[in-house]
Structure formats: C-alpha cells, structure tokens
Image (tube, rainbow, N blue to C red):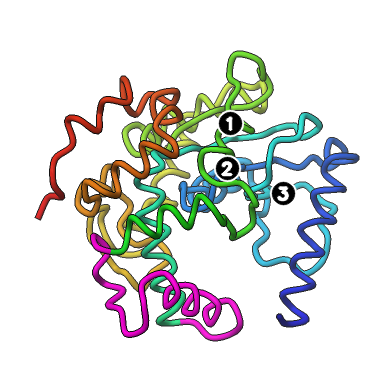
Amino acid sequence: MTARWLAQRLAVASTRWIGIRWGESFPFYYVSEYPKSGGSWLAQMVGDYLQIPVPQNMILPLGFSCVIQNHWRHDPRLRRVFYLYRDGRDVMVSSYFHFIRMARHSRGPAPARVRRIYERLFGKGHDSRDIVRHLPRFIAHEFQRPGRGTRLNWRDHIVSWYRPERRDGIAYLSYEELRRDCVGTLGRAIEKVTGEASDQWRLETTVEKMSMKRQTGRDPGQSDPAHHVRKGVVGDWRRYFSREAAEIFNDLAGETLVRLGYETDRRWIDRFEDPIP
C-alpha cells in the first residue's frame, strides 16, 4: 500500500462526495460501469465529443467540468450519467486476462496480491494461460469477493443501476450496441444526457478518433494479451467457457442475463456447447 495509492483512493472518494453535492455546478458527467465493460472507451468518446477532459489516476479531488469514469454503486443524486453494461460472461473473460496481464507485467502491491490470490485459487505452479480450466473458480471468486473500484459483483452492480423504467435521467447503453452501431448509440446517449440534438459530423469524428484501430493499431479481434485493450469483441466468452463455468455463471447471474436481453431464459445452459477451439 503506497502513498500514491492512498491519495488516489482519497481523491476518488472526495470527488464522489463533491459530485453528489455540487456536481451540477461544474458540471460533472459520469460514465458508470462494472469494470471491464468498455467504460474507458466510452468515457474517452464522451469527453472528446463534449470537448472536456477525462482525468485518469487523479491524486486530488476534481472541481471542474469533466467526464468521470467510475465503478460506483447507484446514487440518485448523481446527474448526467451514462450507464454502460456488457454481457457478464464476456466481462469475466476480460477480467481474467486483465489480472493475468497485471500479474505478469506489473510491479507493486496490487500485482503481488493478484499472484497470491491465483496461487490460492489454482495452486502453486499453475499455468495461468489455461483459462478454460481455471475460469470456473475465477468466476466464483469474482462474485464472492469483487474488487477494483467496487464492492459489488457484476450481478449486484447491474441491480443497483439498471432501472430504465424508473430513471429517466440516465442514458443506458450496452457495449454490444456500441460495437454494432457506435455512432447511433453514442448519439442517442449524448442527446439523452445533454437534452440537445447531437451533431452527426462530431459523432463520426469522435468515433473514428477513438476506434480500436486508431488507438492500438489493431482491428477488433486481433488479440494482444499484454495491452489494456486486449481484443475488443463481442461473444469471446464462447471460446473459454466450459460447461462448469457456464453452470456457475447461470446459478449466480442467470436472471440478470435474461433481464438485460442476453438470453431469452435461463435454459440457455441446456443449449450450451463446448468452447470453440
């Protein structure tokens, strides 16, 4: 635990407190998500379109108009919110690869902690590249002890935020919609949050500037496990979910998959097939 880490934690908590009480004065815009749902990408697009900063790794509280990406639970006092969600099965796979990258390529207390957790879950000398074998235990652990900016697991984070029938002030959008029609989805969300018509040219310019190709030099689907943006595709979970992993996820969050429209019912598990080689 370092002084910088403590300063960042305090800055985030203070900024949330400021946003709840005075966020309308600046104003703040929020991109809220469960980790690994595409929030960094969306926040950068919102900031570019609105021409306001997107602070990262802050060590001081914020007090100016900006886009704040966060993993907080819902609070009705937060305004101008974009809530981004993603198929939780893809989130689990993306999270697994994220922690592998952290444990292999980063230094400090957090990566060391991740390595200890992996040894406890999978045993000493385990091959972390064997995701199909390790994913069931990883999923169970992620639901029991979530971290990385939120104390809620994927299911509970969705339950906290996802009330489109009651919360008119929040723009709800999915990672899958952004991948399918980024310009249209972003435009509708911008209009919902700002109350103003979106500008087509600005939207197209922003989407092109923040595309995976422009940011990483790779097309979606081209994997780089050492990069924060690993693959950028929809449905990658089918390559890695075993029957056991699918059953565990369905037990823990099957109803949430149905509620979000990713499955029509919880019998998707009966139609499950082995991972694509």
Which residue, given by chain and number where applicable, does mark 2 sit on?
46
**Is disc 1 surrounded by few (<14), some (14 to 19) or many (20+) residues within 10 Å?**
some
Observer-side mark, 1 or 3, equals 1
Q: Earlier in the sequence, mark 1 or mark 3?
A: 3
Residue 178 % position (x, y): 40, 36
Amino acid on which the number 2 mark rests in the picture = Val
Q: Is residue 277 placed above or below 203 in the rendered structure?
A: below
Q: Earlier in the sequence, mark 2 or mark 1?
A: 2
Start-end of magenta stretch: 106-133
Quarter of the image for residue 215 reads bottom left
Q: Earlier in the sequence, mark 2 or mark 3?
A: 2
Amino acid on which the number 1 mark rests in the picture = Val
Observer-side mark, 2 or 1, equals 1
Q: Secondary structure at mark 2?
A: helix
Mark pair 2, 3: CA separation: 10 Å
**Is disc 3 surrounded by few (<14), some (14 to 19) or many (20+) residues within 10 Å?**
many
